[in-house]
Image (cartoon, helix red, strand yellow):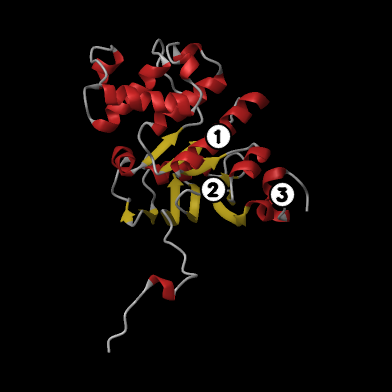
C-alpha cells in the first residue's frame, strides 16, 4: 500500500516565512553598505531592525522594497522571487513602505491623501485628477478610506490639510496611506522619529491595532528602545553593514556586543 502524507505527521514543522532575504549585499563606490545580510519575517509578525546611524538599515529597507537593487542576494515574498521587481510591482504583491522623512502633499486633506493611495492601488483614475479632485470617489472607495481613518483615529481630522497637522498625526497619515494598499508586509523607517512621548504612544497603539485587526507583518527600523521592546518579538542588529546579532527581543538587547555597538554600553 502506498503511504499517504498528512500535515499532522509533522506537528512541529514551521510554516515558511512570508519574507525571506538571503545574502543581501550592496556597495556604493568603495563603501560596503551591506555585507551578506539575511533576515526572515513570518506572517503577522513584528520584527525590528536596529543599529547605530550608518549601519545600513535604510539601505536594507531600500533593497527589500525595491528602491535599490542589491548587488548580491535573493529576496522571496510568499514564495515569489522579487529581485527583478521594482517598488510598484512589489507593492501590488502586498508590500508597503513608509520613509524616515515625512512626505505629505501641501494643501491636500487627510482623506485626499488616502484617496490618492486607493486610486494608485486600484489603478482607477489618474494621479493629477486625484490631486485636483476632479474625479468623484465611489461608495466603495469612500468606505475603504473611512475604515482606515477610523482604524488610526484620524476621523476627527479627515477634512484638515495634512500639512497643518502635528508631526505625530502626519506620520499616522503616512501609515494610513500605506495601509490603503492592503499590505501583508509593512516596512516602517523610524516611525517615532521626531515624536514626543504621547505621539509615540499613539503610533504604538495604532501599529498594535493594525496587527491585531489585519494580521499585517511589520518590519520597523527604530531607535526608541521601549517602542522596540513593546512591539517586536524579534530583532536584527546591523553594524557597519553586517548582521551582528538576531533573535528574541530581550535576549538581543541584553547581549554585550549589541549593547556596546547600539546602546553605547561598554562590555
Q: Residue at x 43, y 20 (%)?
A: 104
Helix, strand or loop at disc 1? loop
How many C-alpha atoms fall within 10 Å of the one at disc 1: few (<14), some, or many (≥20)?
Answer: some
Between label 3 and label 1, give the one nearer the viewer: 1
Q: Which label was assigned to residue 259?
A: 3
How many C-alpha atoms fall within 10 Å of the one at disc 2: few (<14), some, or many (≥20)?
Answer: many
Helix, strand or loop at disc 2? strand
Name the residue carrying label 1. 190
How many C-alpha atoms fall within 10 Å of the one at disc 3: few (<14), some, or many (≥20)?
Answer: some
Percent from the top left, x then y, of residue 38? Answer: 48, 56
Relative to residue 190, is residue 161 drawn left or right?
left
Looking at the image, the residue that sits furthest to the right is: 266
Residue 238 seen in this snapshot:
no
Percent from the top left, x then y, of residue 23? Answer: 44, 58
Between label 2 and label 3, give the one nearer the viewer: 2
Q: Residue at x 50, y 21 (%)?
A: 170
Q: Which label was assigned to residue 47?
A: 2
Q: Nearer the viewer, residue 208 or 263?
A: 208
Q: Residue at x 55, y 53 (%)?
A: 242
Q: Residue at x 25, y 31 (%)?
A: 122
214 shown above or below 237:
above
Q: CA distance from mark 1 to mark 2?
A: 13 Å
Relative to residue 100, is residue 142 drawn left or right?
left
Dots 1 and 2: beta carbons under 8 Å?
no
Helix, strand or loop at disc 3? helix
Q: Nearer the viewer, residue 176 or 171?
A: 176
Q: Nearer the viewer, residue 241 or 188?
A: 188
Amino acid at each position: 500500500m502506498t503511504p499517504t502524507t498528512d500535515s499532522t505527521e509533522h506537528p512541529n514543522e514551521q510554516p515558511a516565512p512570508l519574507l525571506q532575504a538571503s545574502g543581501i549585499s550592496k556597495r556604493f563606490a568603495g563603501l560596503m553598505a551591506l555585507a551578506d545580510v539575511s533576515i526572515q519575517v513570518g506572517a503577522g509578525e513584528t520584527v525590528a531592525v536596529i543599529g547605530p546611524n550608518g549601519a545600513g538599515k535604510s539601505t536594507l529597507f531600500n533593497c527589500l522594497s525595491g528602491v535599490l537593487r542589491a548587488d548580491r542576494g535573493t529576496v522571496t515574498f510568499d514564495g515569489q522571487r522579487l529581485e527583478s521587481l521594482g517598488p510598484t510591482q512589489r507593492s501590488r504583491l502586498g508590500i508597503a513602505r513608509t520613509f524616515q522623512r515625512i512626505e505629505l502633499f501641501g494643501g491636500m486633506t487627510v482623506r485626499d491623501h488616502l484617496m490618492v493611495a486607493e486610486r494608485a492601488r486600484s489603478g482607477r483614475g489618474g494621479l493629477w485628477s486625484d490631486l485636483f479632485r476632479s474625479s468623484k470617489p465611489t461608495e466603495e472607495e469612500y468606505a475603504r478610506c473611512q475604515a482606515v481613518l477610523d482604524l488610526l483615529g484620524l476621523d476627527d481630522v479627515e477634512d484638515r490639510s495634512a500639512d497643518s497637522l502635528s508631526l505625530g498625526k502626519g506620520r499616522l497619515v503616512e501609515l494610513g496611506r500605506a495601509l490603503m494598499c492592503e499590505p501583508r508586509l509593512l516596512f516602517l523607517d523610524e516611525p517615532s522619529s521626531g515624536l514626543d512621548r504621547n505621539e509615540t504612544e499613539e503610533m504604538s497603539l495604532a501599529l498594535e491595532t493594525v496587527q491585531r485587526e489585519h494580521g499585517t507583518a511589520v518590519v520597523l527600523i527604530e531607535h526608541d528602545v521601549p517602542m522596540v521592546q513593546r512591539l517586536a518579538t524579534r530583532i536584527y542588529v546591523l553594524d557597519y553593514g553586517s548582521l551582528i546579532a538576531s533573535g528574541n527581543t530581550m535576549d538581543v538587547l541584553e547581549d554585550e556586543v549589541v549593547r556596546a555597538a547600539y546602546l553605547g554600553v561598554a562590555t
